[in-house]
Image: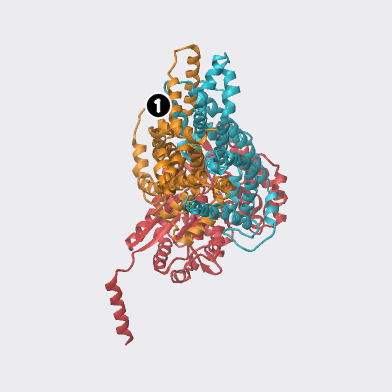
Chain colours: A orange, B red, C cyan
């Protein structure tokens, strides 16, 4: 993190001691709690109904606590539910999703960082325009991409494989990655860069030794964003995979969207949770760094 | 000598490596209990022949998501061996020249003789067999809760439309929901199959939905059919919009509603809830359509695959058409076998009726493809019809305007 | 720098990938919109008939109208809510990280999960309306999701819930970046909190507004999964958005060329709305390339 921003942050933190209890503070907390309640409602409903037996769900009340709580739906969703012809639950598909997400996130972070570095520290002809084009690319609707990308993957021999999915997700992660890093590096203190250059630092040394180590907050922002988007993607996962590589979202969709049979809502909700756990964990664990990262980079005027 | 040369080559192949394990990759959307279990029967059958079943399920939208994934797979040059498909979708894919030719197997097994002609229209393209049908569903069925009907004073089964309306009225006045329905476009259209058949008969149905004759589509008969849809609309409950079809069936099963007009996959729901035909629930044709069958058939279309996969693919097609598989699968699924020579001993009473109806309709020329399920017009027109039917059902246009819109959609 | 072309070289993989996989595909789609493609791409040209067909479909125009309504409400409400939450949390709250996590977590869920959960909550027969009835308030109705005119607003509700936490994080970061001395000086001068916010703080949040807009617009365009999971596009066709229209015609209806035409129109619309913001982002923080 740059020294300027660190000092700044510390100054702000120092002045932010919790203040005394007043009527104003009461209203503040009340309003916040009200909002928190509204935000938590859907997930409370999903959680509470995921541990109810099915007849309680049908007979009862959406918000009532379970009379006979059971973890059976979770066990079902994890390892016993019908996903296709076999009743394997969601467990086997976690691996496919991780194999796809982790490399894609790492590569697109690396590319975003390098792009941001080049665009802010070097004179590139038409650099600003190129940035604009890369940024605009995030708005492309994915349906447009499906057929031509399938053709491309076929030509490259990557059809139906995890590698193909990694390529696809990396490509469409470049836009936001470049945006995050470019804004961060643009605010990077130029004196440090100048003095490093005068000391003889070359292209990669400057990046590797100076800028990248200071980028932790924005790396966290980018990882969170890319991880969430790639983990939750359905369209590419269903279209570019085959029986051996399809990710968790496709399995979850098979669990939740089956056309016949009794809808076991409790299993569906348990399944939705299980599928969402990695992203939830990523968000909760890195929440602090997330805000710090946004603050240290993308939004300073 | 040739023989010793061949022997030498064969033993060399055996020595260098085993023959590659055979496998089929199957793309489908049967992901829930009953159907998946039924498909599992096929999987076990193939596994006993040494063929691995590679499952590629993509659920949702009655195959919509699966069909999208299929496009990507075909475009990337990596199609699955077999894909579940309905009606005109098979024809559309066959036109692209990417499907396999099953004539050898079909000839050996005599498929031409045992598969109803109306089905063959979709299983074959240009005289070549391209798909193996698994079942025949029918859409002009009515399912009723016997106890509700008794309490409402409906003692005789309605034989024509007017009697049906009287019965719906009685059920509604007795405090139940008259018609259990889910307001999704395809369900509205499923109702429409039966309503058009009962209003205009098989000839009108064919002129309008198969030949797309604008004079039939924008006609007084069609307006009358739409008026009847409005009548049905007055017997659904206020929360029908976007309700899943099996929840509507549940309304009938649990005695909250009297009737449901739905294809015979609904029977599976009744059987799973341990209801007995003719005791707990009744199955009848949409009043006025007795003797007629509007059908749709799930078929596995076979794609062109590499030479090393063709053997397994052929075995899959053969296993699908096996009479004992056809019986086992359809008993669970609620439909009837796609071959007419399967004994009906394992089926329940409604299933037996279905098989008899199919054979009769096939003989008398009253077997028509369901418009609602892609067996009368291709996808683009079918969906255009959907737009009109669901718009009219939701009150956004008059019957006269709807009939006109139907003719426009078919252009 | 010794190697003049090294920076350009480093940029080139990204430029190549984006060039081909985004702009190349856009060009391909543009071409497709003039062909006779049905189930798969068909390269034979068919003139402007796809556009003629496109403009004759009322569902196309209702989708565009829905997008305008949805996107406007979604973006405005998310920004207002996000900024409000950020300001509230910025007031030196004790349990800040807990509140922040609560508001942020919906972003971690996929659109399918969000749509399904809200579909449940808003269904009159099993969700909120029924619960309130069971609590004794029999006359309460909330059947927007089943009402052709109101269903689009349920999509707004679900979408706002999903992303306003992220907007809050962006604004929180912006607020934290504001210079304290100016604020203290204003307070010493006796300015009221309200005034400080409207005159000093909010105007300085410009970059947060721009970044939020980019994120929110991106989400609005991508909202196919949410609509399908929440309302199925219904009742009837009442909640169709252009992304739903495009999917339907390109895939489900085997009218790929018409779908491509709708995509072209949609891209033009996106460009018109988004390019000014993209240009602002470009000009912001230009560094040595200024």
Q: Is residue A192 above or below residue C186?
A: below
Numbered disc 1: what chain? A
Left of A11 or right of it: where is A80?
A: left
- Callout 1: helix, strand or loop? loop
Which image quadrant: the C terminus of chain B?
A: bottom right
* Residue ID at (47%, 55%): B336
Query: Looking at this rendering, what residue extends furthest in the front direction?
Result: A198
Which image quadrant: the N terminus of chain B?
A: bottom left
* Residue ID at (72%, 51%): B219
Q: Which residue is mark 1?
A: A65
- Residue nearest the observer in this picture, A144 or B281: A144
Residue A24 pos. (x, y %): 50, 14
Residue A222 pos. (x, y %): 45, 40
- Residue nearest the observer in this picture, B39 or C234: C234
Quadrant in the rendering for residue B179: top right
Q: Is residue B220 visible?
A: yes
* Residue ID at (56%, 69%): B126
């Amino acid at each position: 993190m740059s020294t300027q921003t660190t000092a700044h942050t510390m100054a702000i933190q120092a002045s932010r001691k919790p203040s005394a209890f007043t009527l104003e503070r009461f209203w503040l907390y009340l309003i916040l709690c009200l909002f928190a309640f509204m935000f938590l409602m859907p997930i409370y409903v999903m959680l509470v109904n995921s541990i109810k037996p099915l007849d309680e769900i049908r007979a009862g009340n959406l918000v009532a606590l379970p009379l006979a709580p059971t973890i059976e739906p979770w066990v079902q969703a994890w390892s016993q539910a019908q996903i296709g012809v076999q009743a394997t639950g969601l467990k086997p598909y976690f691996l496919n999703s991780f194999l796809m997400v982790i490399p894609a996130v790492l590569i697109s972070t690396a590319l975003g960082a390098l792009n941001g570095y080049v665009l802010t520290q070097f004179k590139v002809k038409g650099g600003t325009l190129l940035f604009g084009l890369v940024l605009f690319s995030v708005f492309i609707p994915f349906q447009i991409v499906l057929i031509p990308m399938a053709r491309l993957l076929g030509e490259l021999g990557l059809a139906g494989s995890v590698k193909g999915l990694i390529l696809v997700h990396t490509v469409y992660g470049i836009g936001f990655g470049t945006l995050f890093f470019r804004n961060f590096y643009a605010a990077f203190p130029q004196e440090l860069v100048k003095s490093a250059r005068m000391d003889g630092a070359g292209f990669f040394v400057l990046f590797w030794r100076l800028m990248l180590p200071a980028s932790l907050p924005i790396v966290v922002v980018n990882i969170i964003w890319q991880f969430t988007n790639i983990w939750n993607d359905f369209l590419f996962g269903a279209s570019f995979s085959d029986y051996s590589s399809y990710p968790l979202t496709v399995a979850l969709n098979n669990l939740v969207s089956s056309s016949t049979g009794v809808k076991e809502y409790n299993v569906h909700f348990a399944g939705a949770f299980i599928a969402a756990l990695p992203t939830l964990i990523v968000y909760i664990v890195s929440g602090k760094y997330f805000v710090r990262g946004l603050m240290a980079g993308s939004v300073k005027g | 000598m040739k023989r010793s040369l061949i022997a030498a080559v064969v033993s060399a192949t055996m020595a260098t490596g085993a023959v590659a394990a055979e496998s089929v990759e199957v793309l489908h959307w049967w992901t829930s209990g009953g159907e998946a279990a039924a498909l599992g029967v096929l999987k076990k059958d193939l596994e006993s022949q040494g063929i691995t079943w590679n499952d590629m399920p993509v659920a949702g939208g009655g195959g919509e998501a699966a069909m999208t994934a299929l496009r990507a797979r075909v475009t990337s040059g990596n199609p699955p061996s077999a894909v579940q498909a309905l009606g005109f979708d098979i024809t559309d894919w066959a036109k692209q020249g990417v499907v396999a030719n099953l004539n050898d197997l079909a000839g050996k097994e005599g498929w031409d003789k045992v598969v109803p002609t109306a089905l063959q229209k979709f299983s074959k393209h240009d005289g070549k067999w391209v798909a193996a049908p698994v079942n025949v569903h029918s859409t002009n069925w009515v399912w009723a809760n016997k106890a509700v009907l008794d309490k409402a004073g409906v003692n005789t089964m309605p034989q024509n439309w007017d009697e049906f309306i009287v019965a719906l009225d009685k059920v509604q006045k007795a405090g139940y929901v008259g018609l259990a329905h889910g307001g999704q476009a395809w369900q509205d259209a499923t109702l429409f199959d039966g309503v058009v058949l009962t209003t205009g008969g098989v000839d009108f149905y064919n002129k309008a939905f198969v030949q797309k004759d604008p004079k039939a589509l924008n006609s007084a008969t069609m307006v009358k059919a739409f008026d009847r849809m409005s009548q049905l609309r007055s017997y659904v409950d206020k929360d029908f919009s976007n309700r899943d079809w099996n929840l509507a069936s549940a309304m009938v099963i649990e005695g909250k509603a009297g009737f449901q007009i739905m294809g015979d996959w609904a029977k599976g729901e009744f059987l799973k809830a341990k209801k007995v035909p003719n005791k707990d629930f009744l199955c009848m044709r949409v009043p006025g359509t007795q003797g007629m069958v509007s059908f749709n058939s799930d078929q596995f279309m076979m794609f062109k695959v590499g030479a090393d996969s063709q053997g397994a693919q052929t075995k899959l097609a053969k296993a699908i058409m096996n009479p004992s598989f056809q019986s086992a699968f359809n008993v669970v699924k609620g439909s009837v076998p796609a071959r007419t020579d399967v004994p009906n001993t394992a089926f329940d009473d409604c299933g037996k009726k279905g098989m008899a109806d199919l054979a009769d309709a096939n003989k008398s020329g009253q077997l028509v493809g369901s418009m609602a399920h892609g067996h009368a017009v291709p996808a683009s027109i079918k969906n255009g019809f959907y737009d009109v039917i669901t718009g009219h059902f939701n009150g956004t246009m008059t019957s006269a305007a709807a009939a006109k819109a139907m003719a426009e959609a078919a252009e | 720098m010794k190697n003049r072309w090294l920076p350009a070289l480093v940029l080139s993989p990204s430029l190549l990938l984006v060039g081909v996989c985004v702009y190349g595909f856009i060009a391909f789609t543009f071409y497709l919109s003039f062909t006779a493609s049905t189930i798969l791409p068909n390269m034979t040209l068919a003139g402007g008939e796809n556009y003629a067909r496109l403009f004759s479909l009322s569902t196309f125009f209702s989708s565009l109208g829905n997008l305008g309504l949805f996107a406007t409400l979604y973006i405005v409400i998310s920004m207002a809510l996000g900024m409000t939450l950020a300001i509230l949390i910025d007031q030196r709250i004790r349990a800040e990280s807990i509140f922040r996590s609560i508001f942020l977590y919906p972003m971690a869920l996929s659109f399918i999960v969000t749509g399904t959960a809200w579909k449940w909550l808003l269904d009159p027969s099993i969700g909120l309306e029924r619960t309130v009835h069971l609590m004794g308030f029999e006359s309460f109705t909330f059947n927007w999701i089943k009402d052709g005119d109101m269903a689009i607003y349920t999509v707004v509700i679900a979408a706002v819930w999903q992303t306003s936490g992220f907007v809050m994080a962006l604004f929180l970061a912006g607020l934290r970046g504001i210079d304290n001395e100016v604020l203290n000086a204003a307070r010493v001068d006796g300015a009221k909190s309200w005034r400080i916010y409207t005159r000093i703080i909010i105007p300085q949040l410009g970059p947060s507004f721009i970044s939020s807009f980019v994120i929110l617009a991106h989400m609005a365009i991508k909202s196919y999964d949410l609509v399908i999971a929440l309302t199925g596009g219904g009742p009837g066709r009442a909640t169709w958005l252009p992304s739903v229209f495009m999917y339907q015609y390109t895939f489900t209806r085997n009218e790929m060329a018409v779908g491509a035409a709708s995509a072209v129109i949609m891209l033009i619309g996106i460009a018109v709305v988004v390019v000014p913001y993209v240009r602002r982002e470009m000009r912001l923080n230009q560094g040595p390339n200024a």
